[in-house]
Structures are given as C-alpha cells and as structure tokens.
Amino acid sequence: MSDLFHLGCPVCRRRFSGEATTICPACFYPTSITYDLDAVRQRISHEAVQARPRDIWRYQELLPVTPGAGGLAGVGWTPLIPAPRLGRKLGSGDVLLKDDAACFPTLSFKDRVVAVALAAARELGYGVVGCASTGNLANAVAAQAARAGLTSWILVPADLEAAKLLGTAVYGAHLVRVAGTYDQVNRLCLEISERHGWGFVNVNLRPFYAEGSKTVAFEIAEQLGWRLPDNVVVPMAGGSQLTRIARGFQELVDVGLVPAHPVRIFGAQAEGCSPIVTAFLEGSRQVVPQVPQTICRSLAIGDPADGYTALEAMTSSGGGAGLASDPEIRQGIRILAESEGILGETAAGVTVAVAGRLLAEGRIGAGDTTVLCITGNGLKTLECLDGHLDLGAPLDPSMAAFEARHAQLAGAA
Ligand SMILES: *Cc1c(COP(=O)(O)O)cnc(C)c1O
Ligand SMILES: [Zn+2]
C-alpha cells in the first residue's frame, strides 16, 4: 500500500499491513487509518487536486487506497446547491445542500464509502464482499460489486422498502433478508465474515469504509472555494459519516488546503431511533441502545458503532443535535421538494426538519453559512408518502371535466 497511510491501533500504535484488522489484538481498541499529514502536505495542492477528474479520487492522498489501484471512477463530486427558498422557509439567509441524492451509481452517499472499501478489498485480495445494511449500503455494495466482478452477500432486515430490496437483488447479489433488526443483522455479519473470510465493507473493512465519508467534507470545502462552512447538519445512523466529515474538515486545515475555521457539527436522528441524539441532549457520553421504530429505515441503527465519536465531534465543535418525528420527516421531505425541487429520502426529511428546529431555537445562526447533507434519494422511499399526498380522483378525459377541476383546485390555492 501507499507510504502516506497505514492501518493501526490509536492506543498502542501497532500497525497492521495486508490484513483487515478492525480490533487491535493487544488492547481491543478499534483500529483506524492514520496518514502522514506532513508528507501529504508536501504533495497535495489546490492545483494538483483541481487537475484531476471530478470524483472522490481527486483527494487520493487523503484516502486509504494506493493511487491507481482501481477504485470506481465517477463516484462523488455531487452538487453543492444554494437553497435560498428553503433557507427562507427555515429562517436562514445562507443554506446550501450537499446533494448526495445524485451520487453515482446508486443515489446515496454510501457509494462513497463502498468505493473506498471495495478498492481496499481488492488490494487485500478479497474475492467475496458483503455488508449488513439498512438499505442504501445494500444497493451500493450490490452495484459496485457487480461492476468489479466480485461476488456479494448482502444481509438486511427483511421488511425494508421495495427499492432497497429490489434495487439490490437486481444486480445479481446474494440478498439475504433477515427476520430481525439491523443490529441483529450486523452481529450475524461479524460471525459470517470471520467464518468465511469474506470482506464485509462495514464490518472487517470498516476502517477503510469510514474514510470514504471524508470526501463529503473535502468536496464541500472545495466547492465553497477552498473554505469551510460555519455549520453542517448531518443525519446519523451509526454515526460514522458525521464523525468523518468533522475529521475531513480538520485534515484539510492540517494539510494547508483551507484556512482554519471552526465548523459546528450538528447531528440529526429520527425520534423513533435516537440513541446518539438522546445521549447528547442528556449531556451524557453513554449511548444506550434502542429498538428502532421509525419510517426512516436508513437511519434505524439502535446500537451505533460510532456513537461515542459522533458525540465527541458534536460537543467539541460547539455544535448540537436534534430529533424529528415521523410526521416532521414527511414534512421535511415535502418542504425540500417544494422549495428546491429536490426529492430526498426519509433521512433528508430528518435533516431538513432538524435544521429548521435548530434555526428556530437559535442554535444555528440565521446569518451563518450552513450546509445540509442530503444523503439519499427519495425515489427509494416513496412508500412513506403513500396516502399523504392528494393525487386526486381520475378525471374524465373531457375539457368540461378539466375546467371543473381547474376551478376547484385554483380556488383552493
Ligand atoms: C447510512 C446512511 C446515513 C448514516 O450513516 P452513518 O455513517 O451510519 O451514520 C445517512 N443517510 C443515509 C441516506 C444513509 O443511508
Ligand atoms: Zn493496540
């Protein structure tokens, strides 16, 4: 692998090369990737980055993959969209959307983490890959494994949304629907990965997977003209993305690509699955597991692996956290769609609702630059709107019938 990074134990500093060790055998602490940031600083520059293709690999010095090792091209570099109409509704003058609902190839931010994990899997020699998923990760692993010619095994809770299930099976993945919660699926995958020696992207390949989320932060900074925003609002499931976005901003400062600027990190969860936000609001560092019950299936992780580090990131940045109920999630989806023409999934509804609450409470300043992370596409979770939008009765194909409808609807507006 490259000389710029290594997989190691942050406690005893042991290094692990050529193997996907997730827990240090000496101190039982989770392993992570460490970069030689002084060496990166020597090699990276605005010009070098900007000369490369517009995807996550333009930040190759800060990713745990050997350059040219064959990561999927075209992933990432999603739009950063000014959202003035949404901002007016929420009470802020400067809101931007990081729109990973448009991410290649499967329309969620999980394409980023999977691209990095599968590139690492290839370098480490795994022929079979897999994941435990709440849906979007399943889509991303299935699609990218198909493209890479890898066999994939994908385990999910049995009753996910149709697009998450069909949109996984269609790629020829071995889809296993488990009659249980995500947390049960995840424990099963840990055993499977050990027994069969497969590369599970969010289990034994997790240190690599997690690094992919930093590219959200890198792109936000570059798209703002190499500067950092004041606030970022991030939906949380396991808490990995939020933690790594915070880390990504810091790394850009450390390697000299952006001037230092404090970014307040805000986390968002659904009321029906809120282990991290509940701990934050209680001022506790103890994340108590929950059994999820929410329409936001993508964020339904009751026992979050990165809960503690997410709490750290929110607290130490001076950020905050908030919750959204199921009706508020639907409302958030509709406000986003009606004001900006962007259809986000349930996680986006959580983010928009929580951003509105934080602005209303003055936790986020109205004059700040605030980025909302829209992490997945609403076409995958349309079920949650079933029965909540008026589609109208079928119309007789006559002009008279249309004029009657026109008078009725225009009068109502
Ligand atoms: C997985 C997921 C998240 C949260 O990711 P974590 O890193 O587990 O916190 C957010 N949004 C969507 C749409 C997701 O699929
Ligand atoms: Zn150790």
Image (cartoon, rainbow, N blue to C red):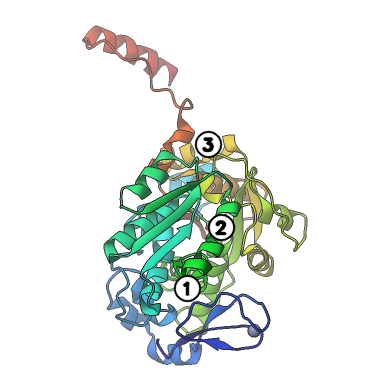
- Toward the front, the furthest residue is 195
Q: Residue 331 carries which label?
A: 3
Label 2: few (<14), some (14–19) or many (≥20) C-alpha neighbours in 10 Å: some
- Which residue in the protein does label 1 denote? 208
Question: Alpha carbon of mark 2 to alpha carbon of mark 1: how far?
Answer: 20 Å
* Residue 91 falls left or right of residue 287: left
The amino acid marked with disc number 3 is: Gln
Name which of mark 2 and mark 1 comes first in the sequence: 2
Front residue (pair 324, 318): 324
- Which residue in the protein does label 2 denote? 188
- Residue 98 visible at all: no
Residue depicted at x 30% and y 52%? 171
Question: Alpha carbon of mark 3 to alpha carbon of mark 2: how far?
Answer: 35 Å
268 to 29, vertically: above or below: above
Asked whether the residues under the numbered discs 3 and 1 touch, taking CB atoms below 8 Å apart as contact, a structural biologist would say no
Which mark is in front, 2 or 1?
A: 2
Question: x%, y% of residue 310?
Answer: 63, 64
Report the number of numbered marks.
3
Label 3: few (<14), some (14–19) or many (≥20) C-alpha neighbours in 10 Å: some
Point out the image quarter for the C terminus: top left
The amino acid marked with disc number 1 is: Phe
